[in-house]
Amino acid sequence: MHFTNSIAALAFLTSAQASLFSSLLAPRAASCPAVWTTISKELTSLFVTNLQCNDNARAAIRGVFHDCFPQGGCDGSLALFADELSRPENTPLVATMNSLKALAVKYKVGVADMLMFAGSHAVVSCPGGPTTKTYIGRKDATAAAPPNQLPAPDVSAAEAKAHFLAAGFSAQDLAALIGSHTAARQFTVDTTKSGASEDSTPGLWDVLYYLQLITKTSPFSFGVDKNLLADSETGPIMKTYSVNKGAWDKAYAPAMAKLEVLGAPFTQIDCTGALPRSLLKRSATQNYARSVINSLTMGKIAAF
């Protein structure tokens, strides 16, 4: 397996992270620096095409997971060190990570903060995406994260749950976070289907990922998606989310916020207000997604 060593490395963080995350709920006296509002406008241009989130947004969301889960937590090492960014699992992220690093240099902010802010921004750049409580104040990494710290895309449900549990996440957190695949495309797992999405509307943040996974109509699915759906613990939760977006949003936003603070404690300044409002404008594609969701719900979900 690819992440056995990371479980031990992350385990010691669990109690500290729980305390840190709880502390984020307390109000902060410091206000968000105005530069983040300016950065937010640039990120909107980078992440939105034709009122939908694009490949840069997808890479930014994935970048949060790839930066935070290796030993060291959310420290920007993914974008700061070429040897880490060039690893096979990270190669689809290279262009976007380099753009975010350049943006951090331009505005004289931390790369770690940029990656986390960008991840939150990317989610709301997808129409329907929930707002994640987002903080700045991290210290940038001084070295690359060790290799082989990320779960492979075909791991068993038990392995995936163990990896997340070691970092302080519940089965519900995992079932919610895996839903970010609603905006995902794959490029390296199956090169014959490079660019394939995990649902029919990768530019939108909707429950079609869960629905098409359940009904086996996804353009592409990772092995871990199927394994988690079949699991007795995560499967029922994913099926609930497939017909209740509100429940998914309610679980996803705090789980993503918890993910973005993995690592050593940092100066916590709330910059959630610098994020744009969720894009909810209707489009032909959104109407298509709604019709697909309705047809799948009427005909097939009842069997589950």
Image (cartoon, helix red, strand yellow):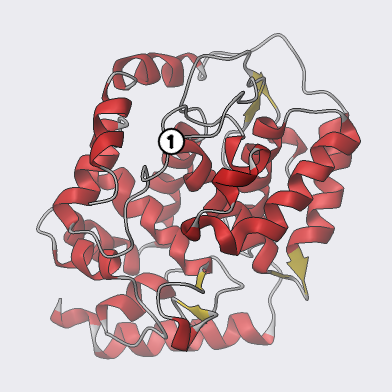
Q: Which residue is mark 1?
A: 146
Note whether residue 276 is visible: no
Q: Is residue 73 above or below residue 250?
A: above
Residue 230 visible, this angle: yes
How far across and down, in percent of the image, does residue 270 sit?
66, 24
Q: Is residue 224 above or below residue 196?
A: above
Q: Going 53% across and 67% down the picture, which residue do you hit? A: 183
Q: Quadrant of the C terminus?
A: bottom left
Residue 94 percent coordinates (x, y): 66, 57
Observer-nearest of 108 and 47: 108
Q: Amino acid at mark 1?
A: Pro
66 with respect to 78 (left or right): left
Foreground residue, 74 or 199? Answer: 74
In the displayed structure image, the side of residue 217 where residue 134 appears, left or right: right
Does 199 sit above or below residue 172?
below
The structure residue drawn at horizontal position 67% and vertical position 37%, both measured from the top left corner, is 80
Q: For the view shown, which residue lies furthest in the top direction?
A: 29
User: Which of 17/24 is in front?
Assistant: 17
Q: Position of residue 116 (x, y in %)?
A: 62, 38
The residue lying at 34 percent from left, 70 percent from top is 210
For the residue pair 22 and 119, the one nearer the viewer reads as 119
Q: Quadrant of residue 298?
A: bottom left
Which picture quadrant has residue 124?
A: bottom right
The residue sitting at the front extreme is 83
Judge left or right: residue 227 versus residue 225.
left
Instruction: Where is residue 175? Give x, y as percent.
Output: 30, 53
Q: Residue at x 39, y 51 (%)?
A: 177
Give residue 154's quadrant in the image.
bottom left
| Classed neighbour count for the residue bearing mark 1: other residues with Cα under 10 Å, few (<14), some (14–19), many (≥20) | few
